[in-house]
Protein backbone atom coordinates (compact mmCIF):
# COMPACT_ATOMS: atom_id res chain seq x y z
CA UNK A 1 0.00 0.00 0.00
CA UNK A 2 2.15 2.83 -1.32
CA UNK A 3 -0.18 5.72 -0.46
CA UNK A 4 -0.70 4.83 3.17
CA UNK A 5 -3.94 5.12 5.08
CA UNK A 6 -6.58 7.78 5.34
CA UNK A 7 -4.97 8.94 8.57
CA UNK A 8 -1.67 9.57 6.80
CA UNK A 9 -3.34 11.37 3.89
CA UNK A 10 -5.36 13.58 6.23
CA UNK A 11 -2.19 14.49 8.15
CA UNK A 12 -0.51 15.57 4.91
CA UNK A 13 -3.58 17.49 3.72
CA UNK A 14 -3.83 19.32 7.05
CA UNK A 15 -0.13 20.26 7.06
CA UNK A 16 -0.70 23.80 5.78
CA UNK A 17 -2.91 24.58 8.76
CA UNK A 18 -0.12 23.75 11.19
CA UNK A 19 1.79 26.99 10.46
CA UNK A 20 0.08 30.31 11.17
CA UNK A 21 1.08 33.85 10.24
CA UNK A 22 3.43 35.17 12.88
CA UNK A 23 4.56 31.71 14.02
CA UNK A 24 8.25 31.13 14.37
CA UNK A 25 9.24 28.13 12.29
CA UNK A 26 12.51 26.59 11.26
CA UNK A 27 13.41 26.17 7.63
CA UNK A 28 12.90 22.41 8.05
CA UNK A 29 9.41 22.89 9.50
CA UNK A 30 8.43 25.08 6.56
CA UNK A 31 9.97 22.62 4.08
CA UNK A 32 8.14 19.67 5.69
CA UNK A 33 4.84 21.58 5.60
CA UNK A 34 5.26 22.43 1.91
CA UNK A 35 6.29 18.83 1.14
CA UNK A 36 3.27 17.38 2.92
CA UNK A 37 0.89 19.84 1.25
CA UNK A 38 2.33 19.00 -2.17
CA UNK A 39 2.09 15.27 -1.42
CA UNK A 40 -1.59 15.72 -0.54
CA UNK A 41 -2.39 17.45 -3.83
CA UNK A 42 -0.18 15.15 -5.88
CA UNK A 43 -1.65 12.02 -4.34
CA UNK A 44 -5.24 13.13 -4.93
CA UNK A 45 -4.46 14.24 -8.49
CA UNK A 46 -2.69 10.95 -9.20
CA UNK A 47 -5.56 8.79 -7.94
CA UNK A 48 -8.17 10.85 -9.81
CA UNK A 49 -6.15 10.88 -13.05
CA UNK A 50 -5.39 7.17 -12.89
CA UNK A 51 -8.97 6.22 -12.08
CA UNK A 52 -10.35 8.38 -14.87
CA UNK A 53 -7.75 7.01 -17.28
CA UNK A 54 -8.77 3.44 -16.52
CA UNK A 55 -12.47 4.29 -16.84
CA UNK A 56 -11.88 6.03 -20.16
CA UNK A 57 -9.91 3.10 -21.56
CA UNK A 58 -12.90 0.78 -21.04
CA UNK A 59 -10.91 -1.52 -18.76
CA UNK A 60 -13.72 -1.26 -16.27
CA UNK A 61 -16.81 -3.19 -17.21
CA UNK A 62 -18.94 -0.99 -14.96
CA UNK A 63 -19.83 2.69 -15.22
CA UNK A 64 -17.32 5.02 -13.55
CA UNK A 65 -17.85 5.73 -9.86
CA UNK A 66 -17.49 9.47 -10.26
CA UNK A 67 -17.66 12.14 -12.95
CA UNK A 68 -15.82 15.36 -12.26
CA UNK A 69 -17.37 18.62 -13.42
CA UNK A 70 -15.48 20.53 -16.11
CA UNK A 71 -12.69 22.72 -14.78
CA UNK A 72 -12.93 21.52 -11.18
CA UNK A 73 -9.97 22.92 -9.22
CA UNK A 74 -7.46 21.02 -7.12
CA UNK A 75 -8.53 23.17 -4.17
CA UNK A 76 -12.07 21.81 -4.55
CA UNK A 77 -10.85 18.21 -4.84
CA UNK A 78 -8.70 18.61 -1.74
CA UNK A 79 -11.64 20.08 0.21
CA UNK A 80 -13.85 17.17 -0.86
CA UNK A 81 -11.28 14.60 0.28
CA UNK A 82 -10.52 16.37 3.56
CA UNK A 83 -14.23 16.74 4.40
CA UNK A 84 -14.86 13.08 3.64
CA UNK A 85 -11.93 12.01 5.82
CA UNK A 86 -12.95 14.37 8.65
CA UNK A 87 -16.59 13.26 8.49
CA UNK A 88 -15.77 9.53 8.47
CA UNK A 89 -13.09 8.81 11.07
CA UNK A 90 -14.05 5.13 11.17
CA UNK A 91 -12.67 4.78 7.63
CA UNK A 92 -9.25 6.34 8.31
CA UNK A 93 -7.55 2.95 8.69
CA UNK A 94 -8.46 2.09 5.09
CA UNK A 95 -6.10 2.64 2.11
CA UNK A 96 -5.98 6.30 1.11
CA UNK A 97 -6.54 5.45 -2.56
CA UNK A 98 -9.90 3.83 -1.79
CA UNK A 99 -10.91 6.78 0.37
CA UNK A 100 -10.10 9.29 -2.39
CA UNK A 101 -12.28 7.36 -4.86
CA UNK A 102 -15.03 7.08 -2.23
CA UNK A 103 -14.92 10.83 -1.56
CA UNK A 104 -15.08 11.61 -5.27
CA UNK A 105 -17.98 9.21 -5.87
CA UNK A 106 -19.97 10.74 -3.02
CA UNK A 107 -19.31 14.33 -4.13
CA UNK A 108 -19.42 13.85 -7.90
CA UNK A 109 -21.73 10.96 -8.81
CA UNK A 110 -22.27 10.30 -12.49
CA UNK A 111 -25.72 11.29 -13.72
Image (cartoon, grey):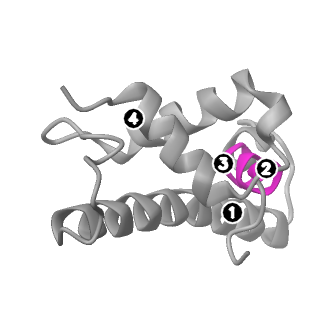
The span picked out in magenta is 6-14
| Residue neighbourhood size for the residue with mark 4, other residues' Cα within 10 Å, grouped as few (<14), some (14–19), many (≥20) | few
Name the disc covering residue 36, or none: 1
- How far apart, in angstroms, are the residues tagged by discs 4 and 2? 18 Å
Residue situated in front as seen by the camera: 108 or 16? 108
Q: Is residue 109 magenta?
A: no
* Residue 13: numbered disc: 3
Q: Earlier in the sequence, mark 4 or mark 1?
A: 1
Q: Position of residue 40 (x, y in %)?
A: 59, 57
Q: Earlier in the sequence, mark 1 or mark 2?
A: 2
> From mark 1 to mark 2, how far is it between C-alphas?
8 Å
88, above or below 72, in the image:
above
Per the image, the residue denoted by label 2 is 11
Expressed as whole percent of the image width and height from the top left, the position of residue 22 reads 77, 37
Q: Residue at x 33, y 30 (%)?
A: 108
- The outermost residue toward the left is 70
Mark 2 is surrounded, within 10 Å at the Cα level, by few (under 14), some (14 to 19) or many (20 or more) other residues, namely: some
Which residue was labeled with disc 4? Answer: 76
Amino acid sequence: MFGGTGTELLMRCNAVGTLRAGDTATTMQVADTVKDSNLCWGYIAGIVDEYQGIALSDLLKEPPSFCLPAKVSMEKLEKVVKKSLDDNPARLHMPASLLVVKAMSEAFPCQ
